[in-house]
Image (cartoon, grey):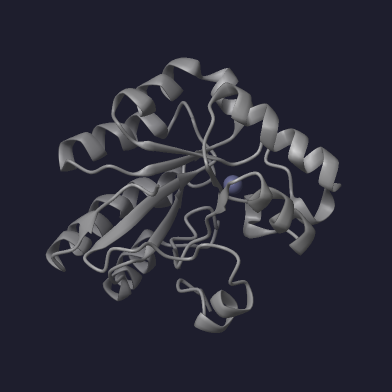
Amino acid sequence: MMFFRVPLLVQLLFSRRVWKGENRNAVYLTFDDGPDQLTTPWVLDLLKKENIKATFFCVGKNMTKYPDIFQSILDDGHAIGNHTYAHEKGIRTSIDSYLQALNKTDEIHHSSLFRPPYGRINLKQVKKIKALGKKIIMWTWNAQDYKKNMNPNTIISNAKRIKGTDILLFHNSIKSKRNMMESLPSVIRIVKQKNLSFQRLS
Ligand SMILES: [Zn+2]
């Protein structure tokens, strides 16, 4: 069983985090783990062609590795979020190391948006990060494009359940490349057919 939608109960239990956007007539496309050589330029081309602005939750290490690709994300007017420095897992990392990873990425590009890798973060970390003035951004709809046993057609058929305010999660990585590339254009078409627009997070 593949869970695309985050249950409302989970959203209520973790209410200090942002699960959805504010505009009922819009959805919010987000891409985690880039910039990435193989997928990010392809995504940027598609978004330009479709006239869509999105939000990229970038890993500091990859921003350093691919500065030109990172610059293209900025030049195209997309929003940037912090996704730690080396994709640290919150629950396995001390609070000090976790904040250090976050700050190191902020030094490359400051953002008030933060998304914890794997969505895994403890309450202490949540409180500290919010005290820094950051919003902790989760998602309501997860393409699960990184899963080996995922099929692009399954992603596309589950896109029919997307609704206004949804934050959609895709990835920019080698692992998610095939599923992302083979489903994203159709997901965009389905969202547009619902008369929903695409917005950046802020
Ligand atoms: Zn990630």
Can you see residue 183?
Answer: yes
| Furthest-bottom residue in this view | 9
Q: Is residue 158 left or right of residue 97?
A: left
Q: Identify which residue, 23 or 180, lies in the foreground.
A: 23
Relative image position of residue 122 (x, y in whole percent): 76, 61
Query: Which residue is found at the position 56% from the left and 83% from the top?
Result: 9
Q: Is residue 47 above or below residue 199?
A: above
Q: State the count of labels.
A: 0
Q: Quadrant of residue 72?
A: top left
Q: Is residue 171 left or right of residue 201?
A: right
Relative image position of residue 156 (x, y in whole percent): 31, 64
Q: Quadrant of residue 183?
A: bottom left
Query: Which residue is found at the position 53% from the left and 79% from the top?
Result: 1
Q: Quadrant of residue 177?
A: top left
Relative image position of residue 182 (x, y in whole percent): 32, 50
Query: Which residue is found at the position 65% from the left and 44% from the top?
Result: 132
Q: Is residue 95 left or right of residue 184?
A: right
| Furthest-top residue in this view | 68
Q: Identify which residue, 183 or 126, lies in the foreground.
A: 126
Relative image position of residue 65 (x, y in whole percent): 58, 19
Query: Which residue is found at the position 41% from the left and 20% from the top?
Result: 71
Q: Is residue 99 above or below residue 152?
A: above
Q: Is residue 1 above or below residue 24?
A: below
Can you see residue 85?
Answer: no
Q: Identify which residue, 143 or 196, lies in the foreground.
A: 196
